[in-house]
Image (cartoon, helix red, strand yellow):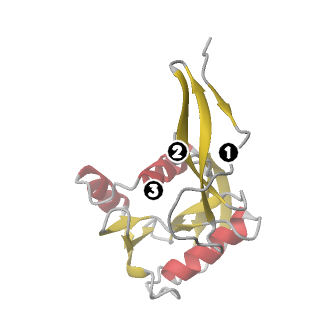
Amino acid sequence: MSRSRLCRQDSEQLLPGPAFPTSPIRVEVVHYLGVDGPTDRVQISPADARPGVVVVAREPGERIAVIRQFRAALDAEVWELPRGLGSSGSPAQDAARELEEETGARAHHLEPLGHIHPDPGVQRQQMVVVRARVPEATTQPSDVEEIAEVAWWTPGELCEAVRTGVLRDGISLAALHVDAVMPG
C-alpha cells in the first residue's frame, strides 16, 4: 500500500513571476505527503479544466496532417499533429476549429477516440484524441502567425519521421498510437 498522497488544501499558491490573468494555464504548488515526508510539487493545469484536443486528420489518400511550429520550451520549431486547448466543451468542435486554424482543412467526419494525459507527473491536463477525415489536403492555415508549415505525410513518411526523431512530440506520438489501435 502506498503511503503517498496529495493534500490539496492551501494549494492555490501561484508561483512567482509575471502575472497572466487571462492565461488558459494555471500553475500551482501542491503539498505532497510522500513516503519521505511532506514536500511541495509544481502542478500545471488548464484554468477551466476542459480537455484539449489533438487531431489525427487524414485526407482521401490516407496522408496525415502535421504542422511545424515554434515551441518556446524547446526554443525550436517542431513537427506535431494539430492540437489546442478545449474551449467549446465539445471535443469534435474544438478539433474542427484547431484543424482549420492550423491546416486550413475542414473535416467532414470527426470521431473522438479517447483521452490521454500528456504528463500526469506535472500536468492535470487531459487531451481528447480525435480522428478526422477531410475531403482534401490543404496547406493554408488561418493562423499564419503560429504555424510555420503544414504538410501531409504518407504513413511511410510518418514512420520515417518517428524513426529518425523528426517527429518526437509526446502528445502526437500518443495520439498516433491511440489512432492505430482503435478500429475504423
Q: Position of residue 9 (x, y in %)?
A: 74, 39
The CA distance from mark 3 to mark 2 is 18 Å
Determine whether 58 is above or below 10 in the image.
below
Which one is nearer the viewer's eye here, 16 or 135? 16
The image quarter in which residue 67 lies = bottom left
Could you tell me which secondary element the residue under label 2 belongs to?
Answer: loop
Determine whether 39 is above or below 117 in the image.
above
Q: On residue 122, which mark appears?
A: 2
Q: Is tag 1's residue or tag 3's residue first in the polypeptide sequence?
A: 1
Q: Amino acid at mark 1?
A: Ser
Q: Which residue does the image show at 60% across and 56% down from the upper left?
A: 14
**Outermost residue to the right:** 89
- Quadrant for the N terminus in the image: top right
Q: Which residue is mark 3?
A: 172
Could you tell me which secondary element the residue under label 1 belongs to?
Answer: loop
Q: Is tag 2's residue or tag 1's residue first in the polypeptide sequence?
A: 1
Q: Which residue is mark 1?
A: 11
Determine whether 110 is above or below 177 in the image.
below
Which one is nearer the viewer's eye here, 168 or 48? 48
Q: Amino acid at mark 2?
A: Val
Q: Amino acid at mark 3?
A: Ser
Q: Position of residue 164 (x, y in %)?
A: 22, 54
Determine whether 38 is above or below 64 in the image.
above
The CA distance from mark 2 to mark 1 is 14 Å
Q: Are marks 1 and 3 in contact (CB under 8 Å)?
A: no
